[in-house]
Amino acid sequence: MIQLSRWKVVLVVLAVILGALLAYPNLLSPAQRAALPDFVPKNALNLGLDLQGGSYLLLEVDVDEMRQARLDNLVEDVRVSLNETGVALARIEREAAGAVVRVAPADQDAAFRALQPLGSQPGLAGAAAERTVSRVGNDGIRVVFTPQALEQMGPNAVEQSIEVVRRRIDALGTREPSITRQGANRIVVQAPGESDPEELERVIGQTAQLTFQMVDDENTVQDALAGRVPPGSELVYDEFNTPYLVKTRVLVSGENLTRAEVSTDQNNRPAIGFRFDGQGARRFAEATRPENRGKLFAIILDGKVISAPRINSPIPNGSGIIEGQFTIAEASEMVNLLNGGALPAPLTVEERRVVTAELGADAVQAGAISV
């Protein structure tokens, strides 16, 4: 007969009791678990996709479009920098990594000095500049992204997209989502308990790009609609298909947003309150300076104008509200998207499906038989 010491028996009994206490909440409903005293374990086992079922999405990050947007911003930075210093621009020649600016030979020194700050735009903190500025002949200046910056755009965009998708799914209340990278530009999302992959796709697939851009009051919308869009401007529409001619240059973007919250406007209708960081507050104050009093600036979300208020006075504190035809639900969803961050690049859904719990049920049955 096997003889066990008393301390071993006591240890086994305590282990069994502790295991039973930790497993017991799984037999209760959520309401019953919430009613348990605080000192009693109440965490239940989080069931995965195979045991609970849910939604499966395979997403692809559109790195090419993101690179193209970065190149467009670079060209616009070049155009604005030369305009601010009064240098006459002959033409801009696009290249794969940037652009070559052509100016009069007599203006090359002034143009080079004006464009040199564009070459000191850092990529990551403590990293080398991601742009270079160099002379080309006696009338050209090349402003391009470095090879290292171009190479890192794709991996950085995928990593940022994973974090943004994770924050958005967490805001939905989904427990234990699985978000993993697949290959170079793809992301696999498994959300247990989410039975509608299209709804999940709608929430996590919105880019949530928020920009503040000045309305072009020097040219007319009618000329732009006729195909004569001036350089440095673009046509943007609101939800009612009303056209706006706005400056391409972004004054402040959602990258400078520190907090968004559901608020109300002066008529007690749902609105979105926002606050910028220090850099965004300075840019916002510069955009609303006294010289711009009476001008309009457009608030653009995902390529649509949601508001175009008039500048009545400077706004030095970097905070305000976005008014629009929002319902409470729409304002709440938009706040969650803005607080979760903007996607650095569009996401394309390569595959979507609803996963049932059949595989997990078979595994559970096999486990019960083996026990």
Image (cartoon, rainbow, N blue to C red):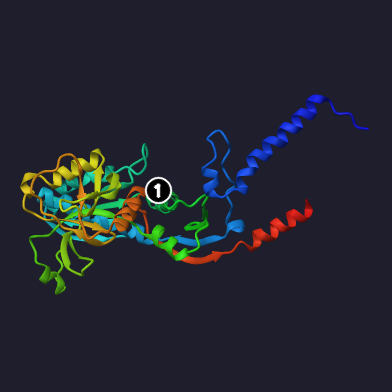
Q: Nearer the viewer, residue 301 or 84?
A: 301
Q: Position of residue 254 (x, y in %)?
A: 28, 49
Query: Is the residue 310 above or below the residue 8 in the image?
Result: below
Q: Nearer the viewer, residue 347 or 39?
A: 39
How many numbered marks, from 0 up? Answer: 1
Q: Nearer the viewer, residue 331 or 66?
A: 331
How far from the left and from the top, in percent, is residue 245?
15, 63
Screen quadrant of the N terminus: top right
Which picture quadrant has residue 310?
Answer: bottom left
Q: Is residue 123 visible?
A: yes
Front residue of 188 and 96: 188
Other-residue count near label 1 (Cα within 10 Å), few / some / many at <14 / 14–19 / ≥20: few
Residue name at image x 77 percent, y 56 percent? 369
Q: Is residue 74 above or below residue 303?
A: above
Residue at image x 43%, y 63%?
199
According to the picture, the residue beneath numbered tag 1 turns out to be: 148
In this rendering, position of residue 209 left or right of residue 288: right
Q: Picture coordinates of residue 139 (x, y %)?
A: 18, 55
Residue 50 percent across, percent down from the top left? 61, 58
Amino acid carrying label 1: it is: Gln
Q: Quarter of the image holding residue 97?
A: bottom left
* Residue pictured at 39% horizontal, 52% vertical: 153
Question: SS of the residue at dot 1?
Answer: helix
> Does the rendering let one see residue 140?
no
| Residue occupying the far right of the picture | 1
Left or right of residue 348, residue 136 in this image: left
